[in-house]
Image (spheres, rainbow, N blue to C red):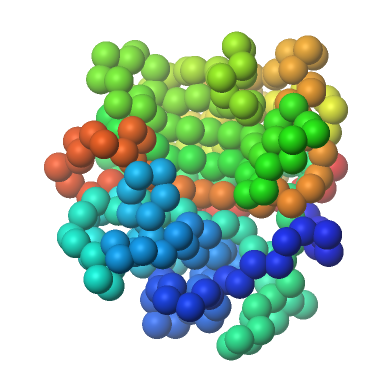
């Protein structure tokens, strides 16, 4: 990951926004050697942070002894009603040599080709997440580039969700964007008793992307020889494997579709580890 001076400068703590907890500075949480920004979605309105037809609450992200905890729960932001809220965090930059001071955020770093690892757990099983709850780990560039096939430079390491389809036997997918292009969505099923997963994405611009999902928690040095689920994207899909730009690593837990209020209890995923090795 690296700095890119040509990318838009964004205020991490705009007027009216909410800190995730009293200990944070510039709306940053510290986890796995990186700053994680909680205020990505800050279309502030009378109902708080509103995007994709739902409320996003930065306070639903926290760092615990187990890792970076994400919750989808009912919450109330200033001037807004009590309602189901989603949460998203963005990797802002490395901590080492990159101080975060009040009013002076650290330098922002952007995703570059290499190997990425995200390990995560959920209290019961990933198959048991609400039918319209989605856990996502992905790259994303906010400002679209119309000159490339994947305008937001989005690569989805995983989206764990049935997207509201109760009868769908699959519960997860690896995705190249745009998802509407035939063959860019690759559905699969995480076994019903699995509550811990390790995701690995090997990304080289202009080459096939390798998506792996392992059952259990691992590091890049302790991965089993074979993944439980693997997709190597087809050679004719390399146009959707973007080069480095202004994309960041995102983690979220959100309602999709947002108009289906299925959860009867809070939904929760804890990211226990994040690693990156450059190409």
Q: Is residue 85 above or below residue 134?
A: below
Q: In which quarter of the image is residue 121?
A: top left
Q: Name which residue lies at 78% across and 32% down.
A: 148
Q: In this view, does 100 lie above or below 67?
A: below
Question: Where's the C terminus, which quadrant?
Answer: top right
Q: Does 259 sit left or right of 253 as displayed?
A: left
Residue 150: x %, y % from top left? 71, 31
Q: In which quarter of the image is residue 192?
A: top left
Q: Is residue 128 above or below residue 99?
A: above
Residue 209: x %, y % from top left? 73, 27
Instruction: Give the farthest residue toward the left.
Output: 264
Q: In this view, does 8 lie above or below 12?
A: above
Q: Does 44 sit left or right of 217 as displayed?
A: left
Question: Where's the N terminus, which quadrant?
Answer: bottom right
Q: Name which residue lies at 55% across and 30% down.
A: 213
Q: Please say whether residue 101 is visible from this viewpoint.
A: yes
Q: Name which residue lies at 55% across and 65% down.
A: 37
Q: In which quarter of the image is residue 62?
A: bottom left
- Along the viewing direction, whichever of 206 and 231 lies nearer the viewer: 206
Q: Name which residue lies at 25% across and 20% down.
A: 166
Instruction: Give the farthest residue toward the bottom.
Output: 102
* Number of on-image labels: 0
Q: Please say whether residue 202 is visible from this viewpoint.
A: no
Residue 16: x %, y % from top left? 42, 76
- Along the viewing direction, whichever of 150 and 107 lies nearer the viewer: 150
- Along the viewing direction, whichever of 123 and 109 lies nearer the viewer: 109
Residue 152: x %, y % from top left? 67, 39
């Amino acid at each position: 990951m690296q700095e890119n001076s040509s990318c838009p400068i964004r205020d991490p703590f705009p007027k009216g926004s909410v800190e995730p907890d009293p200990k944070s500075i510039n709306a940053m949480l510290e986890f796995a050697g990186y700053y994680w920004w909680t205020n990505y979605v800050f279309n502030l309105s009378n109902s708080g942070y509103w995007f994709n037809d739902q409320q996003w609450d930065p306070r639903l992200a926290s760092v615990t002894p187990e890792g970076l905890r994400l919750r989808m729960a009912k919450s109330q932001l200033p001037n807004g009603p009590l309602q189901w809220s989603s949460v998203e965090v963005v990797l802002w930059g490395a901590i080492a040599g990159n101080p975060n001071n009040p009013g002076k955020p650290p330098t922002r770093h952007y995703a570059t080709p290499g190997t990425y690892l995200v390990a995560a757990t959920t209290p019961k099983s990933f198959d048991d997440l609400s039918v319209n709850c989605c856990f996502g780990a992905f790259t994303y560039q906010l400002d679209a580039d119309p000159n490339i096939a994947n305008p937001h430079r989005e690569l989805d390491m995983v989206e764990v969700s049935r997207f509201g389809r109760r009868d769908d036997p699959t519960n997860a997918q690896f995705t190249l964007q745009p998802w509407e292009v035939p063959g860019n969505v690759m559905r699969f099923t995480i076994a019903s008793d699995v509550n811990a997963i390790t995701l690995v994405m090997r990304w080289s611009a202009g080459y096939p992307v390798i998506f792996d999902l392992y059952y259990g928690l691992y590091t890049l040095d302790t991965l089993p020889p074979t993944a439980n689920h693997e997709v190597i994207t087809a050679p004719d899909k390399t146009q959707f494997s973007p080069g480095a730009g202004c994309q960041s690593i995102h983690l979220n837990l959100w309602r999709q579709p947002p108009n289906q209020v299925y959860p009867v209890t809070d939904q929760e995923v804890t990211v226990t580890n994040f690693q990156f090795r450059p190409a």
